[in-house]
Image: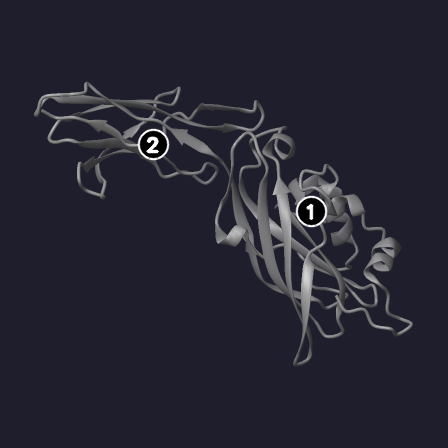
Amino acid sequence: MRIRAAATVVSSAVVLSALAVPRGAAQAAEHPGASTGLRAFASKSVQPKDSLGGTTFTDGVVNGGKDIVLGVTGKKAVTVTFTAFDEEGVAVTQAFLWQGTDSSSTDTITGALASDDDPTCTETTVQGGYSYSCKTVFTIDPAVAFKDGNGTAGTWKLFLGAYDLYANASYNDDVARTKIKRAAKLTANASPEPVKKGKTITVTGKLSRANWTTGKYAGYATQPVQLQFRKKGSSTYTTLKTVKTSSTGTLSTTTKAVSDGYYRFVFAGTATTGSATAPGDFVDVR
């Protein structure tokens, strides 16, 4: 970012040092100090949102506008982009993903993630000031970030903060929203096979979803799941019926054998759980 030479202007490192922003908060996304760093930044402004520094934030996009769906293992890199504007210029920006009602109070922050590093921004001179196109990455490891519970699945907000070249702080704690969801798995098995035309086919399966606390997948109870069929030679599936999973997530339903084809279950997902589609299971009708 642009750093002016005037005596009253400071570098981003000096800004962060003078205002005591925890550098650890901008490290790995699962860093335990994320909520502290978020609150510390928010408390630097006298008023919430865009205050002392006058920096404004627009066009926030998390993960390309798609839900963040996480299993029980493996890290996921989530890209965040946004635009910042300031009449005088910006020294440094920071980004967090968070849940809660008040970003300036740890008592009301139920979840917080920090970006891997401070956002990288490209400056453009525009009418009335300077515009910044910014990008950063959150590397999320569910086994670390969410090991204490599954309750954080759902809606998260994007917090963006900035220090201008005179060490004034601005932030907006709800620039954009995203959903962090637990991944789901679905199976399907159609039998008997082969089967005579007109006879009954039984399709069984199981819907399970990631449990971040245990690090395993567990059955997802009483959820609506569609049974679909695709005739051999066709590329289109047709929904035959909707059934619900049992208390342990299992599925079992019947249908009549009409022609050769593939049977599968499809789960649309919920506000906290991602969608899932079972591989089609072929049945030979004779």
In the picture, residue 234 is in which quadrant? top left
Residue 87: horizontal and vertical position, in percent?
72, 75
Residue 215: horizontal and vertical position, in percent?
56, 24
Label 2 environment density (alpha carbons within 10 Å; few <14, some 14–19, many ≥20): some
Residue at 71 percent of width and 38 percent of height: 31
Residue 129: horizontal and vertical position, in percent?
70, 77
Quarter of the figure with the N terminus: bottom right
> Can you identify the residue that label 1 sits on?
116
- Asked if residue 98 shows in the view, the reply is no
Residue 101: horizontal and vertical position, in percent?
63, 46
Instruction: Specify the farthest residue to the front.
Output: 233
> Can you identify the residue that label 2 sits on?
278
Question: Residue flagged by tag 1: what amino acid is it?
Answer: Asp
Position of residue 53 relative to residue 38, above or below, is: below
| Left or right: 190 as drawn, with respect to 245 | left
Residue at 77 percent of width and 58 percent of height: 45
Question: Residue flagged by tag 2: what amino acid is it?
Answer: Ala
Of residues 207 and 272, the one drawn nearer to the viewer in this rendering: 207
